[in-house]
Image: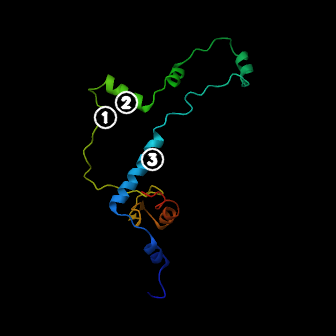
Amino acid sequence: MSARESHRIKEAEKKRVLDEFARQRRARKALEALEQDNFHEDPHADLVMSKKLPKFYDNLENNRSKKTKRKGADYYKAKYRKNFIQLLEEEKIYRPEAPNYFSAQASPSNLPPRHFCAVCGDFSNYTCTACGTRYCSIRCLGTHQDTRCLKWTA
């Protein structure tokens, strides 16, 4: 070895390099973790306001006319809100012949797939040698190596 060796080359030799199967398994596990995070329903949906809280707008309402307020469409929309799974089930039951979420398909693209930077989301031209994650610049590579690269092992 020469006396003048690049620090980057020394660091690259120390890194663990994953094969393609390990990279795919790691990406699948990361997607499964994200899907599990997304599955939860709204934690604030069943929140009930306490009646002991002070009412700051009482005086304003008393000064207005004494008409009773009717509940509008927005009230019922909020009260009977449906989650995504319920909407899909209704769509399957009530409109099975119409194009829907399950029947929509598009042909594969003729263009090559785009690659995006895992750090900033910009177009990327480079791939991490250790884990295969895409990045667009040296700055994003530094961020990736400091915070993301091989932190979650497969």
Q: CA distance from mark 1 to mark 3?
A: 23 Å
Q: Secondary structure at mark 1?
A: loop
Residue at image coords 33%, 61%: 20
Q: Secondary structure at mark 3?
A: helix
Label 2 crowd bin: few (<14), some (14–19), many (20+), radius 10 Å: some
Horizontal and vertical percent position of residue 146: 52, 64
Residue type at mark 1 is Phe
Residue type at mark 2 is Leu
Residue furthest front as drawn: 154
The residue beneath circle 2 is 88
Disc with the residue nearer the chain's start (1 vs 3): 3
Q: Which one is nearer the viewer's eye here, 147 or 110?
A: 147
Figure label count: 3
The residue beneath circle 3 is 33
Q: Which one is nearer the viewer's eye here, 124 or 43?
A: 43
Picture quadrant where residue 93 is located: top left
Q: Are marks 2 and 3 in contact (CB under 8 Å)?
A: no
Horizontal and vertical percent position of residue 81: 48, 26
Q: Are marks 1 and 2 in contact (CB under 8 Å)?
A: yes
Residue at image coords 48%, 86%: 4
The residue beneath circle 1 is 102
Residue type at mark 3 is Ala
Answer above or below: position of 141 versus 111.
below
Q: Quadrant for the N terminus, please.
A: bottom left
Q: CA distance from mark 1 to mark 2?
A: 9 Å
Answer above or below: position of 131 versus 4.
above
Q: What colouring does the structure picture have?
A: rainbow
Answer above or below: position of 74 versus 136.
above
Q: CA distance from mark 2 to mark 3?
A: 22 Å
